[in-house]
Image (cartoon, helix red, strand yellow):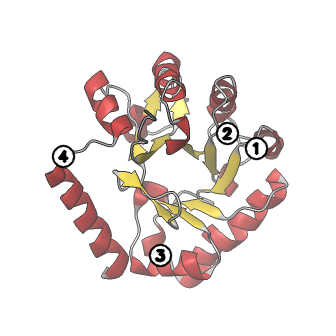
Amino acid sequence: MPVKARAHVALNFHGLGEPHAGIDADERPFWLARDAFAAILDRIAADPHPDRFAITFDDGNASDLEAAEMLASRELKGRFYVLAGRLGQPHYLSREDLRTLATMGMTVGLHGRHHLDWRTLDDAALEDETVRARDEVAHAAGRPVDEVAIPFGAYDSRVFTWLERHGFRRILTSDRGTFDPVARVWNRNTMMAGMNADEVETILTGNAGPLERMKQAASRAYRRRFR
């Protein structure tokens, strides 16, 4: 009897190994040890339906290249959302690195230019963070860019409307839970150092409790339609 596919789950990572000096203290818990990341990839690769997972990285840290190699060695793909303003800076991906990721079959997407809260920006600044930054990332990668991961997972209805109007085919949040692979918006689960095996497994199986799912859905609906 065929194994029934479980829910689609998107996992979001930020960096591997020891965070470099430029990482603020409040961001350091979002970096995973290499062996912890490898264990998650092994679990995904062994799943009867590994394609139900979306594996994403934000910020464009240099360790993304290592992550891509670990993915490729398991015949997995990843999505890498980079900041145009950090390209070529120490500890971050270069423009050549983006082409390498694209050649490996990884998706290159946008995370903005300067890692700002887009809700606070006027239209001119928001255009620079999204439309102009997207053009620069696409030029560097040698591929069109039509996916965007919202910085901090911070958005409101204005940000959503803006991204849709400016042609982003896929919008990734940090709203947790599962996602519909044909939908424009994908919810992601942020992976953090210190998560225990049960916490990781709950995310991978998409088995949050009914109360948690209701809270997640209510929060998403409110921010996307009313704020």
Drawn side of residue 41 relative to residue 69, left or right: left
Mark 1 is on which residue type? Gly
Secondary structure of the residue carrying numbered label 3 = helix
Judging by the rendered image, the residue that carries numbered circle 1 is 88
The answer to whether any part of residue 202 appears in the image is: yes
Mark 3 is on which residue type? Val
Relative depth, front residue between 5 and 58: 5
Judging by the rendered image, the residue that carries numbered circle 3 is 159
Q: Toward which corner of the image does residue 65 lie, by quadrant?
A: top right
Judging by the rendered image, the residue that carries numbered circle 4 is 209
Drawn side of residue 9 relative to residue 63, left or right: left
N-terminal label among 2 and 4? 2
Secondary structure of the residue carrying numbered label 4 = loop
Q: Nearer the viewer, mark 1 or mark 4?
A: 4
Drawn side of residue 224 relative to residue 208, left or right: right
Relative depth, front residue between 56 and 9: 9
Relative depth, front residue between 39 and 194: 39
Judging by the rendered image, the residue that carries numbered circle 2 is 92
Question: What residue sits 58% from the left and 61% below the top?
Answer: 148
